[in-house]
Amino acid sequence: MDLRFVGFDYPVLQTLHHMMDNMGEEPEANGAGAGSKSSYSAPTRTYVRDAKAMAATPADVKEYPNSYAFVIDMPGLKSGDIKVQVEDDNVLIISGERKREEEEKEGAKYVRMERRVGKLMRKFVLPENANTDAISAVCKDGVLTVTVEKVPPPEPKKPKTIEVKIA
């Protein structure tokens, strides 16, 4: 199985490494950082938010003979709050957002807030044998299971027998 996990790939690490290398440097008049060897632009807020969401959303991936199963904890989310999408014909995106409960009683204040709120997201590049037309998702007790069926392997071609005639 060759599943690549989008979000923990080299460009993310390269961007973080570059940001750490250039911390505290003053930009020059031309807009490039001091000692900058190439043009660099800081990641957008959306990119950083999505990268944090992917890093904070653990997933289990299982391969069965006829399918792949992606298991992700989605605590406190209703089915309408969870999105399962396929982009570019082979990128599975699972996302959702858990919001802070707004129902506070008068005079009540938080003493401790430990439960995670915010965006949950994972992206997976699906292997070639994944059938993106046969995907199902079930959320039970806060655990989302997305099943992607495999394309059945092609039937082996049977050799064609040619009758030899005697002349």
Image (spheres, grey):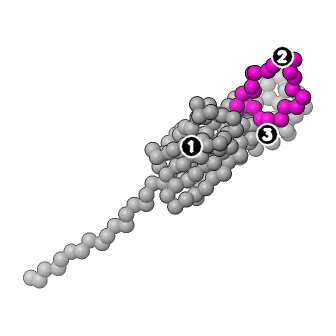
Residue extending farthest to the bottom is: 166
As drawn, is 164 to the left or to the right of 26?
left
Q: Which is more toward the observer, 137 or 124? A: 137
Rounded to the nearest angstrom, the CA distance separating label 1 from label 3 is 35 Å
For residue 27, above or below residue 131: above
Magenta highlight range:
98-119
Label number found at residue 99? none
Label number found at residue 106? 2
Tell me which numbered mark, 2 or 1, is placed earlier along the sequence: 2
Q: Position of residue 90 (x, y in %)?
A: 53, 45
Q: Find numbered disc 2 in the image and state the secondary structure of the residue it sits on.
A: loop
Rounded to the nearest angstrom, the CA distance separating label 3 from label 2 is 43 Å
* Quadrant in the picture for the N terminus: bottom right
Give yes or no for residue 100 being in the magenta stretch: yes
Determine contact: label 1, label 3, CB under 8 Å.
no
* Quadrant in the picture for the C terminus: bottom left
The residue that appears at 90% across and 29% down in the rendered structure is 111
Tell me which numbered mark, 3 or 2, is placed earlier along the sequence: 3
The residue that appears at 80% across and 29% down in the rendered structure is 32
Q: Which is more toward the observer, 44 or 38? A: 44
The residue that appears at 69% across and 35% down in the rendered structure is 76
Q: Nearer the viewer, mark 1 or mark 3?
A: 1
Rounded to the nearest angstrom, the CA distance separating label 2 from label 1 is 37 Å
Amino acid residing under circle 3: Leu
Name the residue that disc number 1 marks: 138
Mark 2 crowd level (few <14, some 14–19, many ≥20, 10 Å Cα): few
Q: Which is more toward the observer, 137 or 36? A: 137
Q: Position of residue 149 (x, y in %)?
A: 49, 51
Q: Position of residue 66 (x, y in %)?
A: 49, 58
Name the residue that disc number 3 marks: 16
Give yes or no for residue 3 being in the magenta stretch: no
Q: Find numbered disc 3 in the image and state the secondary structure of the residue it sits on.
A: helix
